Image (spheres, helix red, strand yellow):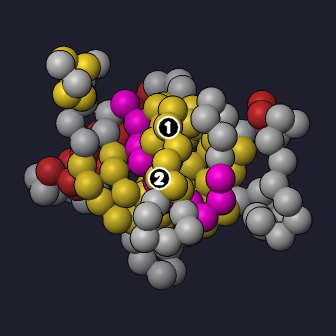
Amino acid sequence: MSKGGLIIRKNERYEISLPARARVAFSHAELVKFSKGASSKDGWVDVHLIDFSTAGIGIVSTTFFPRGTLIEIEVPEAGEESTDVMIRCEMRVMRVQMTDRRPAYLIGGAFTEMTERLEEQITKMLTRLDGTGGEDA
């Protein structure tokens, strides 16, 4: 939404910094292929989660994902020994912009399907970001 050149967001965004990983969603795997060595054998690339809202997320990636591409995102639980995933979702790439400080891309995406499970994961994450804690935080 724009008002006189000013972008007004419908959802509050939280600036964060968390390691994550991304890959092209199965439904777009034939449309977007990485060059050899750009990703792991199963297609995952390391990214960094930089913002979060109820509508989508922002990541920084050294791998380019074209606008419109469906990608899967996983954000692991904190802790070196944890194998649990805090957020697992699919998002559509809405914007891509090269960063000016390092060879990387700022990628903004919107969640594609708001499942009950994703709603629970979003609520849990927002509880952590708000600092309100909760028994699982």
Q: Does dot 2 land on a helix, a strand or a loop?
A: strand
Question: Magenta segment range?
Answer: 55-64
Horizontal side, residue 6 vs residue 53: left or right? left
Question: Is residue 134 something that shows in the picture?
Answer: no
The image quadrant where one finds the N terminus is top left
Which residue is identified by label 2?
106
* Residue at the limit of the structure toward the bottom, as seen here: 80
Query: Label 2: few (<14), some or many (≥20) within 10 Å?
Result: some
| Residue at screen point 47% across, 53% down | 106
Query: Label 1: few (<14), some or many (≥20) within 10 Å?
Result: some
Q: Does dot 1 land on a helix, a strand or a loop?
A: strand
Horizontal side, residue 71 vs residue 29: left or right? left
| Residue at screen point 57% across, 49% down | 73
Residue 59 shown in magenta: yes
Which residue is identified by label 1?
95
Horizontal side, residue 83 vs residue 11: left or right? right
| Residue at screen point 42% across, 48% down | 58
Q: Amino acid at mark 2?
A: Leu
Q: Of callouts 1 and 2, which one flags the residue occurring earlier in the amino acid sequence? A: 1
